[in-house]
Image (cartoon, grey):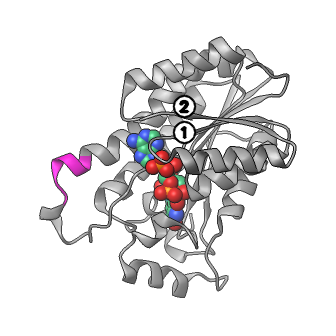
Amino acid sequence: MSTARPIALVTGASGDIGGAIAQVLGSHGWHVIGTYVGAADAAAATVTTITDAGGSAEAMQLDQRDPDAIEALIETIRQQHDRLDVLINNAAWNIGIPFRQLDELTADIWDRVMETNLRAPFLLARAAATLLSAGDGGHIVNISSAGGISPGSSSIAYSSSKAGLNHLTRCLAVAMSPNVAVNCIAPGLVENTRMAQRLPDNVAEGARQTAVLGRVGQAQDIANQVLAFVQSTSVTGQTIVIDGGMPGAMR
Ligand SMILES: NC(=O)c1ccc[n+]([C@@H]2O[C@H](COP(=O)([O-])OP(=O)(O)OC[C@H]3O[C@@H](n4cnc5c(N)ncnc54)[C@H](OP(=O)(O)O)[C@@H]3O)[C@@H](O)[C@H]2O)c1
């Protein structure tokens, strides 16, 4: 398949936020390649929503814990499209382990979180660097978490992986300049998402009560900010928090 549209790769397009991001980019002229690891039906539903609205999209399977699979995915995109304009590093994995329960956070869980949430975004950026640099101005947007700024969220591993992703954003903004802008969105609790449902109850309720705007984020808020970043020509290395205004995450 080839298309004259600019191409956006959205990881985790089978998920709640990734689906919203894919739809916004699809409705603004990008051909969207949306990845999933197991939820083929959900990824197909995202594609159908985009194409039914007149957009262009396809789904591709990717286990982003596998470095070879990442290389193969980008090579497939090169062969089929020979361009890539936008990479949205959205896919992630979490599990609810209260911070004080140190013994429950095993080495295997730590590795799964880090490989999915931090190593894969780097490997995807590295594999895609040549294609992203070739066009008029490539963009990477990493989807992090407010838990990467102030200690909180689903587990110590998740919070640490997202802190790493925030700093990876700054490092890649330097490494991939001047042709690629690299920015980051750090959501707090995002309502009506499965990931939010895996948060310990007290964490989710605490977020709702602390937000100074009286509400937390929606998936559409994240998608709209992605669009703002990829339409910008002069912003790089930035992380913006979308959480309804948590004093602890204001920097
Ligand atoms: N929801 C929130 O409240 C919240 C708050 C802060 C930050 N975030 C961040 O927002 C992003 C999206 O979250 P979400 O709520 O939309 O989560 P979600 O609905 O659970 O979706 C997660 C996505 O990641 C994919 N994924 C998981 N493991 C993978 C792997 N090994 N290889 C490839 N893909 C994998 C899943 O694929 P399958 O569907 O195929 O399993 C799914 O598409 C994440 O980076 C998350 O950390 C979310």
Look at the image and tell me in which quarter the C terminus lies.
Answer: bottom right
Residue 102 in sight from this viewpoint: yes
At label 1, the amino acid type is Arg
Tags 1 and 2 in contact by the CB under 8 Å rule? yes
Q: Indicate which disc residue 172 carries.
A: 2
Quick check: 17 left or right of 195? right
Q: Is residue 108 magenta?
A: yes
Looking at the rendered image, the quarter that the N terminus falls into is top right
Asked if residue 204 is positioned above or below residue 33 in the image, the reply reads below
| Nearer-the-camera pick, 95 or 168 | 95
Expressed as whole percent of the image width and height from the top left, the position of residue 172 reads 54, 31
Secondary structure of the residue carrying tag 2 is helix
Tell which of 36 and 182 is nearer to you: 36
Left or right: 5, with 110 as reference point = right
Residue drawn at x 55%, y 75% is 246
- Residue 63 falls within the magenta-colored stretch: no
Relative height, residue 249 to residue 129 (above, below): below
Crowdedness near tag 1: few (<14), some (14–19) or many (≥20) residues, C-alpha within 10 Å: some
- Provide the residue span drawn in magenta: 105-110
Residue 16 rendering spot, x and y as whole percentages: 58, 59
Label 2 sits on what residue type? Leu
Viewer-proximal residue among 8 and 249: 8
